[in-house]
Image: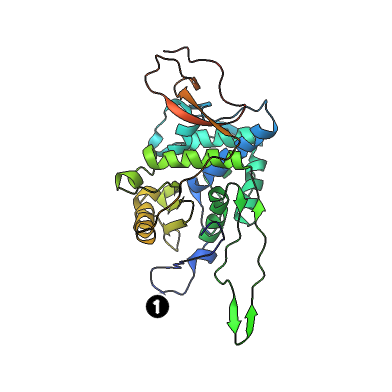
Amino acid sequence: EPRNGAIRALVGGRSYQESQFNRVDRALRQPGSVVKPFAYLAAFERARREPLAEFTAASLIADIPTTFFFNKQPWRPANYANHYDGSISVRQALARSSNVAAVKVAEHASFEMVAELWAAAAGGVQPPAYPSIALGVFESTPLQVATAYTALANGGVRVPLHTISKVVAGKRTITPLMDSPNRIASADGTFLVTSILNSSLESGTASTVRRSGFLPDAAGKTGTTDGLRDAWFAGFTPTLLAVVWVGMDDGGELGLTGAEAALPIWLTFMNSALRGQITPNFLPPPGITFTKVDPQSGLRAAPGCPNTIQEAFAIGTEPVEVCPIH
C-alpha cells in the first residue's frame, strides 16, 4: 500500500523448497528501464528550479542514433530493436521507453541529479553518475524498486516499506521503529511523470494492460536489460503498488522482455487484488494545468491540428505559441 508502506504480499521465489534465497530484498539485479521515470522526474525538478532549463511533457526530443561522450569516452546506446521515432514529445519518449531519449533527458537534468534522486527514492546506495544510469545499468533489489515507486504513487513522498505494524505480547504492544516519510520531489513534477506512465499503459510499452480490459486508473513502466536477462514491471494505482522481476539467478538470458514476462504476472495479481474494490483516480495537484497541444510541434493546438492531446503542465510552463504546422 503506497500510502502507508504496508507490504501486503511478498514472493521471494517460485519455490521455497527449492531455494530459500529471498530475491525480493537480496537479489541485486539491473533495474533497466524502470529507472527511466526518475530521469524524467529529475528533469522536471530542474525545470522547476531553473526556468531557463525548460522541460515539459510536450517538449520535443530527437529520438535518433546519438553518440554521447563521458570522460572523453564515446558511448552509443541503441533503442530496442533499433527502432527510432525521430522528433517525439517527452510523453511519447517515456511511454515508448526510448533509450536514446532517456539518456538525453538525464543529460539535461545532469547524471548526478538522476543518481541522487534514485538513491533518495529507493533508499539504497547512490549509483555511479554515468550516462548509462538512465537505462538502469546498476544494481538494485525489487524491494528498493518498490520503495522508489512509492514516491511516484504518493506525489513525490517516499514512504518506507514495512511488513510488521506491531507485535502484541500479552498486555504489551511493541511498535517497530520506522523511518519517517520523506519528500524527494515536488508534487507537480511527480504528477507529470505519473501522467506519462499512465500513457505507457494506454499506448506505450505496457499497452497490454488496457487491451486486457484492466480499467482502474493506473501507471507503470516496463523494464528489460541487455541480453534480455532481467524482465521488470513496476505499476501502481493510488492504493496499490506491485513490482515484478523475472530472471535467472545465474544471470543467464531469460529471452523475454518486461512486457512479455513481468507484466502478465502484475496483471494477474492486480486483477485479483483489486477485484470488487472501487479504486480512486490520480488527482492533479493545485500547481497543474491542462492545455490542448499538437504533439508534432509541442505547441498550443491550432483549430486545424488533426491529432491533439490534452497535456498536463506545471502552471506557467504551458506553451503560448500556436502550432504553425497545421
Considering every residue shown, the one lying at the far bottom of the view is 170
Write down the quadrant of residue 140 in the picture: bottom right
Please report the residue visible at 47 percent of the width from the left and 12 percent of the height from the top: 324
Residues 53 and 35: in front is 53
Considering every residue shown, the one lying at the far right of the view is 49
Query: Residue 35 in the image: x percent, y percent?
Result: 53, 46
Write down the quadrant of residue 15 in the picture: bottom left
Please report the residue visible at 39 percent of the width from the left and 43 percent of the height from the top: 201
Please report the residue visible at 62 percent of the width from the left and 32 percent of the height from the top: 108
Considering every residue shown, the one lying at the far left of the view is 212
Can residue 126 be seen? no
Q: How many marks?
A: 1
User: Where is mark 1, residue-wise?
Assistant: 17
The residue carrying pointer 1 sits among few (fewer than 14), some (14 to 19) or many (20 or more) residues within 10 Å by Cα, namely few
Query: Residue 283 in the image: x percent, y percent?
Result: 51, 43
Q: Indicate the quadrant containing the C terminus: top left, top right, bottom left or bottom right.
A: top left
Which amino acid, mark 1? Gln
Can residue 234 be seen? yes
Q: The residue tagged with tag 1: helix, strand or loop?
A: loop
Residues 149 and 322: in front is 322
Residues 163 and 132: in front is 163
